[in-house]
Image (cartoon, helix red, strand yellow):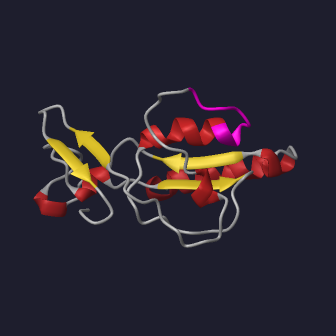
Amino acid sequence: MYYTHIDDSIGRLLKLLEEQGLRENTLIILTSDHGDFLGQYGLFLKQPNIPYDALDRVPFIVEGAGVTGKRVVETPISLVDSLPTLTELAGAVPPENIQGMSLNPYFQSKSDHQPENHAVFSETEEHDKCVRTHRYN
């Protein structure tokens, strides 16, 4: 049960949306604020808080209203991209001078085009800093 808790919960949510007739108008995003080591490098949880892939690479799965086709974006994206993305999907104009870029061109296209020249940044409580791009990942 423990290992399927999230899957089971998402399944119940999708079933409820379907029963209520809301599924086709709902956008679902599955993401996380950080990963866990789960034994990589002999470490567990998220300590020490070092910007390794195990902590920085988290899912950002988007499905539902306004999303066409299934594809994988290999270029690193950042959670700061959520605000302009969700604002546009809601039919509004994102505020000026915000961080992040809208990911809608990638969700609404079946093209394999990837975001270009996009860098993401992470910083730990210990002030370790990391910059990632598609080339330097």
Locate residue 62: give its quadrant. bottom right
* Residue 123: % across, % down: 22, 38
Of 92 and 51, the residue lying toward us: 92
Q: Residue at x 80, y 46 (%)?
A: 25
Magenta span includes 69: no
* Residue 57: % across, % down: 33, 55
Magenta span includes 90: yes
Of 52 and 136, the residue lying toward us: 136
* Residue 124: % across, % down: 19, 37
What span is colored magenta in the figure? Answer: 88-95
Using the image, determine if residue 50 lies above or below residue 63. Answer: above
Q: Is residue 71 left or right of residue 38?
A: right
Q: Is residue 42 left or right of residue 21?
A: left
Q: Is residue 109 left or right of residue 123?
A: right
Residue 49 appears in the rendering:
no
Residue 111 appears in the rendering:
yes
The overriding secondary structure of the stretch rendered in magenta is: loop
Of 101 and 2, the residue lying toward us: 101
* Residue 136: % across, % down: 23, 63
